């Protein structure tokens, strides 16, 4: 909770102060949550992580309403990303995940950059309070 939720909230508050001080400039705050915030992953047991990511998603939605005067606030919820961390998990977990991802592969980190560029740009100027799930279809079935 300290890192995933509190750290995200305090960072957003600091950014909000800068955005407010800038006057009429409308900023964009983008949180990163996880698909773990909208479902319970298996076979791993990670209730605290799931709860913290669910809280980040709801924080983004709440701030989108509260901070509409000076910022858009959105959230990205990635699925399984090919990182050193994911490869440190037991092989049986990774095998299970692959059977549950319709895309049948992990997301490469570079595949996320487009969504962040979009949310930071004027192309998403009317978007606020969204949680964009990037997961190869993992949350669909």
Image: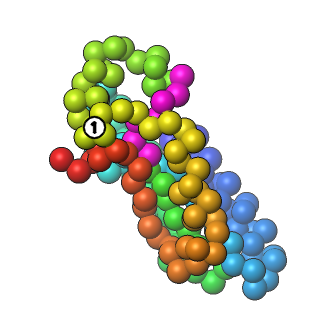
Residue in view at x 75 percent, y 72 percent: 19
Q: Is residue 22 above or below residue 111?
A: below
Horizontal side of residue 23 vs 119, given as left or right = right
Quadrant housing residue 12: bottom right
Query: Between residues 10 and 78, which one lies in front from this camera angle?
Result: 78
Say whether residue 55 is visible.
Answer: no
Residue where numbered disc 1 is placed = 101
User: Magenta stretch?
Assistant: 78-84
In the depicted structure, whether residue 123 falls above or below residue 39: below
Q: Nearer the viewer, residue 119 or 21?
A: 119
Observer-nearest of 36 and 135: 135
Is residue 31 one of those drawn in magenta? no
Q: Is residue 112 visible?
A: yes
Query: Element type at marker 1?
Result: loop
Q: Position of residue 130 (x, y in %)?
A: 44, 67
Which residue is painted at 50% across and 36% down in the image? 108
Please say which color scheme the image uses: rainbow
The x, y position of residue 23, in whole percent, is 79, 83
Query: Where does the image place residue 105, in percent across and percent down from the top left?
Result: 36, 32
Q: Position of residue 129 (x, y in %)?
A: 47, 70
Residue 80 lies in the magenta stretch: yes
Q: Which residue sits furthest top?
A: 91
């Amino acid at each position: 909770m300290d890192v995933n939720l509190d750290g995200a909230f305090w960072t957003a508050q600091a950014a909000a102060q800068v955005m407010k001080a800038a006057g009429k400039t409308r900023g964009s705050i983008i949180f990163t949550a996880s698909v773990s915030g909208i479902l319970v992953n298996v076979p791993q047991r990670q209730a605290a992580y799931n709860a913290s990511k669910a809280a980040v998603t709801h924080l983004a939605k709440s701030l989108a309403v509260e901070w509409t005067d000076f910022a858009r606030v959105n959230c990205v919820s990635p699925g399984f990303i090919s990182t050193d961390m994911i490869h440190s998990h037991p092989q049986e977990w990774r095998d299970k995940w692959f059977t549950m991802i319709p895309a049948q592969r992990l997301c490469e980190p570079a595949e996320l950059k487009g969504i962040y560029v979009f949310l930071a740009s004027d192309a998403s100027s009317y978007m606020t309070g969204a949680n964009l799930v990037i997961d190869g279809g993992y949350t669909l079935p």
